[in-house]
Image (cartoon, coloured by chain):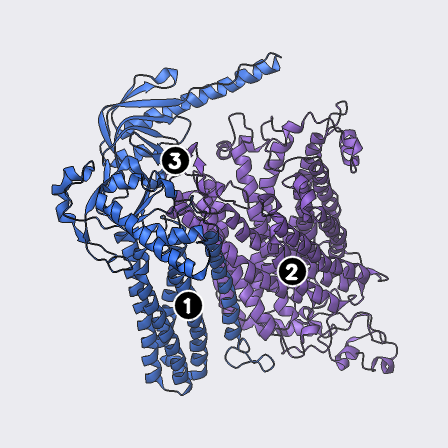
Chain colours: A blue, B purple
Amino acid sequence: MQIPHEVIPRRDTGLYNAKIGIWIFLASEVMLFGGLFSAYAFLRLGVQTGVDNPWPWGLSVHKNFVWLGAINTLVLIASSVGVVFAWVAVKERNWKRYQRYMYFVVACALTFMAIKSVEYYSKLVKHHGIKLVDNSVMEGTIIDRSDKIEFQGEKISFNLQGALPWVFKDFESGEFPLLTVESGPDEVVGDKIASAAAFKAWHSSGRAKVMQKLVDERRRYRAERDAGATPKPVSVNSSVTLVATAPFKVNADFRRLVMHNATALNYRDGVKVEGKLVTDAVRFQVHEVDMQLVLPTKQRSSVVWDVIGSAEAKQHFFDKQSEKYAELKEYYDKRGGIIPDKQLRGRFLNVQYVHVPIDEKSGGENKSAQHDSVHTSDMLLTAGGGDSEGHVGPSKTILVPRDKIKFMSNHGPRYGNYYGIYFTITALHGIHVIFGALVLLFFTIFGKKMFLENPDHLANRVEVGGLFWHFVDLVWIFLFPLMYLL
Amino acid sequence: MSAAANTISEVAESESHHEHQIPFWKKYIFSTDHKVIGVQYGLTSLCFLAFGFFLMMVMRWSIAYPDRPVPVLSDWPWFQSWLDDNGKVTGDLYNMFGAMHGTIMIFLGVVPLGFAAFGNYVMPLQIGAPDMAFPRINMASYWVYVIGGAMMFASFFIPSGAAKAGWTNYSPLATVTDHQYGDLFWTGQTQWLVSMVLVISSSLLGSVNVICTIINLRCKGMTWMRMPVFVWATLSTAFILLLAFPPLEAAAILQLVDRMGGTSFFIPTGLNVSGMPLDAAGGGSPLLYQHLFWFLAHPEVYVLILPAIGIVAEVVACNTRKPLWGYRTMVYAVLALGFLSFLVWAHHMYMTGMGPAISSFFQTTTVIVSTPSVILVTALLISMWGGSIRFNTPMLFATSFLPMFGIGGLTGLPLAFNIPDLHLHDTYYVIGHFHYVVAPGSIFALFAGVYHWYPKITGRMMNEKLGLLHFWPSLIFMNGIFGPMLIQGMAGFHRRAFDGGRAYETMSQQVYAEPGSFLAVIAEKLHIIDPHAALTMIDLNVVTSASAWLLAVFQIPFIINVFASAFVGKKVKSDNPWEATTMEWATPTPPPHGNFLTPPVAYRGAYEYSVPGAPRDFTPQFETDAELIAGSEHTDDPDEAAVPVH
């Protein structure tokens, strides 16, 4: 059985099946990316100044990718043109030329992905941000770049009614500390637990006891209620605290934590580990300070200056700020009017490159002074290459105390909504590029037989693949201004 | 053609000899034949419908008798782990079943049955196509759906259980839940998202296929305005699926990244989890999720109802022996419904504080969207006027569709306005409203479709007596379920209380004062509820639940009928047993691979019944005037019939 109009267009619609198919499919793709783009708009317009992580306006880290993005745009446009020429080549029955153009298209796709991976690498590995307790943000590079939180635990508290606590999963592979039950349901106080297997057995028997007790309590409650008395509320103590004989090590995954501070880790499954943070500081190379989330009156006394510990850097920041303010004021004076926009001020005035000189010895109260010998080797060129004025220079590694950190991350999707939507859309677009390139490569390598038998069928295939390719290009043309320029 | 039908069927059998060369697995399992795929879709989705119904029956037990152990199920060892120590339904189980009931019924049950099963089987036949435009994509669509459905089903049996955050899966609840289970990927909530992405992909493949087929594979003479209403409805549905599903896919992807990658698209700043602030960047918007979700989920309602209306139109036209009244109007109404369905989504979100301006806009569009629905129902009603109606089982289902859908539609009007919605939001009234649209509405129409096209699919008729035993009790108990819900809802019963709203136990309002209280009175007379106690609103829970279980009992005749009739049903005498006019009846019974023996031609419109001067009371699309006369055995005056009938 032959499906009609597979190759030859239908007379009244003027289309062959696959051509309608691809246009319809692209319509749904438009809606998919449209949904994501509207999410972009919604999230961006919804940023509340002073509360949320801001869109990275005017950060030098961000600006460096504009050129890469621009090159990528050109690469994709070139490949889109290439696919059209390949189609023409098939129509002219020129197999050699067709193949050449198709390889060019696939090469463009590879170039695109290569440039993209440079960007991804830089964002995911080289750039980080730290939000301090007063919402001031430092951008730069974390030197020891570990996402795990090293913690020295002494006590673990959890609820026996829940599932097996996560924190014990970490012990399964490593060393299991010797734990004593300090407090818990009546029957289980004072037990000693020495291994992961013993813990599992203890946990399940303890859990069974607690559950049984809960059932008994409920029955009692029901009986008392049915008897007409005012029943005593159901109460079962199922929370447990284990104390270690010696401090033990925990490497906590941030994804499993609700919150941590200098003395406690709070897991999402309700477990609390008490003790102290081991890495009490993060080694960080600061490039920029972002004060958008700090009230103007609090900026000079911000905790960030204690952390950086360089009077020069602070001076530099506020010098730059007043310089910019003067520029802005001049502009508005000329134009006639007052500086109107809070967000505008945030963008131009509150994000400044901070130069932390290397030879700074008078760090004063900063902890970095004590660790200078360690960090001389870490002096690196700033990855961003400086601010818009072209300051380039080495900057010193500072130590950021853990208890001053509210949130920290690489510039991955977790860092803020800009990065989240950037990675989501570009990754989805990247998947489209790879998929499209694979299909076109298939037509190139295995198309010879069809070229000889029914060249128009191959031309149709290339046309359909090309339409998809144009769409992929078009998405990027929207992505480029949205993600890089605006 | 009916006289020649026997011979044609024989020819078909002799010609289909080479079909036997195809191995079994390729012919019936990984088939590219649109009819096999249609039947596969139909059977799979009926299984999911039954499963979704089962979930609901457990929930109804918890609502009616929250303090008694679940009968039967509490004796099953593997089910006991879900129940509490006394064998009762827990809140968690209720949430899980509730969320999955909605998901399974909508995405794995009604949509595949209406759009994919009937769309696949009937639509290509009705336009005279040999198959779908892309048979292999069609097969892929089915198998992606099966994988997605299987994952959804399997998620019940992983440690976390299936998704519990409602079928709407609102963030941030759905994002932060289930975090106590080790591997975040193997939790019900994540599995829900992944299987939804698969089900959505399946729908997209299907809708691309349907649109291409209708545009490009219509047979000779099948112009746009000769297409049956069902084809138009399928086309409109396909466009809705095509354009509305991707935003949900975007939402699912974003939520997946939120769960697995730690982003905060839908997590607002300062969200507390277990009493502590969440270690995430924040700045996301839960409202964004709702917008993306409802941008799909409102048009989804029309995905559920449009194929149903199409089926009803076919059945009504065939059994009233009259042309459809206002065919063109109906076509435009179907298209308008498809278009307007995209403009009303935020009427689900009046309570989110979007602001009065936006509410007013969506209130207006919601009222406008009811216009085409009313046109469709009215046109069908007028079509019946003055007809000599054959009330066989499909026609009974199709007829009862009209008032049931009418109740569903009209009870929606108070919800369209944001002021009454403040009162009715999240009450049982909402449940009653949309179930009237979907259950006695869509599902009745789908039953009508099964009974109507069954002879074409199997070559045997379904049993009429079992059909009646299926129809009348179903009609009564459907109303027994959803009628009381409307009453309870107006009294303010909240929809998500797993104990059926024990908090309303002391509500002084008596049922007798309410319209529809006769149901409670009947229940009292039948000793289902204690006749001495003062009846309150909460006693309606028992009426509803009992109706639900009885409804389940009366689906048994249908199940028997579907399977047994394929073997022992009365054989059809011709290829066109209902004496219908549309193209699908021109094929041999059952249609072979490739459908038509000779390329079909449409000579006239789809509903030429009782044409004055025609030899018979039906004038099929596929017969030339000469064939018409040859086919009519009871023509008294051949000269009169020879006059061109169109």
Seen from the viewer's position, the closer of residues B360 and A429 is B360
Sooner in the amino-acid sequence: mark 3 or mark 1: 3
| Cα–Cα gap, marks 1 and 2 | 31 Å
Residue A294 visible (yes or no): no
Q: Amino acid at mark 2?
A: Leu
Q: Which residue is mark 3?
A: A268
- Residue A31 percent location from the top left of the image: 51, 62
Element marked by disc 1: helix
SS at mark 3? loop
**What residue would you read off at disc 2?**
B340
The kind of residue tagged 1 is Ile
Confirm whether residue B9 shows in the render: yes
Quadrant (top left/top right/bottom left/bottom right) for the C terminus of chain B: bottom right
**Amino acid type shown at disc 3:** Arg
**Which residue in the protein does label 1 denote?**
A477
Looking at this view, is B308 or B499 the one in front?
B499
- Residue B338, image quadrant: bottom right
Q: Is residue B442 left or right of residue A247?
A: right
Label 2 marks a residue whose chain is B
* Label 2 SS: helix
Quadrant for the N terminus of chain B in the image: bottom right
